[in-house]
Image (tube, helix red, strand yellow):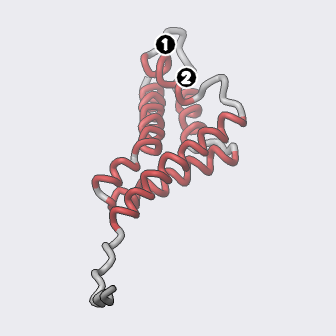
């Protein structure tokens, strides 16, 4: 039972990580220090999608489920609703590439806005314009 709870908790953590990757750039808009956490997370997620790697949380979750005796016949909320979001059956290579591009484009737009907002304003010119 403890292993199943740990696996469910890990699945929730995995979902929260995905949500952070997708929307964490908006935290950066509020406070640029979030970039130190969000940017590596977004780069990791995009790399996993582009390369087709397996996220290390997945084998750990599978191991925990096996240690707990496998998936019981009755589904928990996590198994019923969250696991299909993390591991969709239609996850093709093309969809993985699309997801990776979505992470980069969405966060690129947010970070571009943060960059433009943080840039110092140009100093006023001390030169006077010549009369016409």
| Cα–Cα gap, marks 1 and 2 | 12 Å
Q: Quadrant of the C terminus?
A: bottom left
Q: Residue at x 55, y 52 (%)?
A: 44
Q: Where's residue 24, x and y in %?
A: 39, 47
Tell me the number on the disc at residue 94: none
Please tell me which of labels 1 and 2 falls first in the chain.
1
Q: Residue at x 30, y 81 (%)?
A: 123
Depth check, front residue: 71 or 2? 71
Query: Which residue is tagged 2?
Result: 84
Label 2, residues with CA under 10 Å away: few <14, some 14-19, many ≥20: few
Label 1 sits on a secondary structure element that is loop
Q: Residue at x 63, y 39 (%)?
A: 98
Q: Is residue 58 above or below residue 46?
A: above
Q: Give the residue at the far front of this rendering.
A: 132
- Depth-wise, is mark 1 or mark 2 nearer the camera? 2
Q: Where's residue 38, x and y in %?
A: 42, 53
Query: Which residue is tagged 1?
Result: 75
Q: Is residue 70 above or below residue 41?
A: above
Q: Give the residue at the far top of this rendering.
A: 74
Horizontal side of 96 relative to 43 (left or right) equals right
Q: Where's residue 8, x and y in %?
A: 45, 28
Residue 131, picture quadrant: bottom left
């Amino acid at each position: 039972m403890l292993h199943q709870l740990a696996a469910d908790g890990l699945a929730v953590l995995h979902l929260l990580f995905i949500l952070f990757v997708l929307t964490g750039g908006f935290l950066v808009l509020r406070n640029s220090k979030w970039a130190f956490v969000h940017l590596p997370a977004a780069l990791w997620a995009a790399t996993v999608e582009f390369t087709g790697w397996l996220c290390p949380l997945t084998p750990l979750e599978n191991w925990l489920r096996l240690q707990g005796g496998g998936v019981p016949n009755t589904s928990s909320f996590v198994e019923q609703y969250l696991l299909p979001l993390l591991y969709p059956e239609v996850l093709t290579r093309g969809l993985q590439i699309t997801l990776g591009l979505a992470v980069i484009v969405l966060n690129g737009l947010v970070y571009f806005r943060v960059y433009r907002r943080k840039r110092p304003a140009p100093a006023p010119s001390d030169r006077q314009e010549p009369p016409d």
